[in-house]
Amino acid sequence: MSNFDPAPGYQSYDHPPEYPHHPHRNERRDPGSGTRRAALIIHTIADVAAAFLGLWIVLYLLEANRDNVFVEFVHSVADALAWWSQDIFTMDTEGLRVLLNFGLPALIYLAVGHGISVRLSRA
């Protein structure tokens, strides 16, 4: 007697098992996945840039030790990100000058980055 049916309660191995839908399984076939990924990358870059600028403002206003390696790193990154806006505002109060000269690019990076991200994700 040759019976090839599995015993009751066991799965047949003729067909691959049905797995629940995996969210990334059809990602390559979805035409909008590339634009969503680009939107997320742009959004994240804008957030990181604004975070570095905001962190430098906080470290400056709290009079952090400028000889510290971390403070030097944050200051150099913030200077590189805000090179185009240096000395737009020239006031006598140094704290207010730093706040405005580094806060303006942070807000612009957030607005432009998030705007592009929203535009791409809707496309």
Image: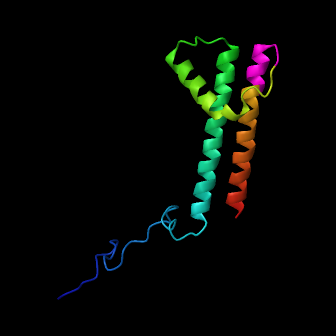
Q: Nearer the viewer, residue 88 or 15?
A: 88
**Residue displayed at 80% across by 13% down:** 93
Q: Is residue 121 covered in magenta?
A: no
Q: Is residue 62 above or below residue 3?
A: above
Q: Is residue 64 above or below residue 104?
A: above
**Residue displayed at 82% across by 13% down:** 92
Q: Nearer the viewer, residue 88 or 48?
A: 88
Q: Is residue 45 above or below residue 84?
A: below
Horizontally, residue 21 falls left or right of residue 75, namely: left
Image spot of residue 84 (x, y percent): 70, 35
Q: Residue lying furthest bottom in this view?
A: 1
Magenta segment range? 91-100
Q: Quadrant of residue 58?
A: top right
Q: Main secondary structure of the magenta part?
A: helix
Image spot of residue 95 (x, y percent): 75, 16
Image spot of residue 102 (x, y percent): 71, 28
**Residue displayed at 28% across by 76% down:** 7
Horizontally, residue 8 falls left or right of residue 93, namely: left
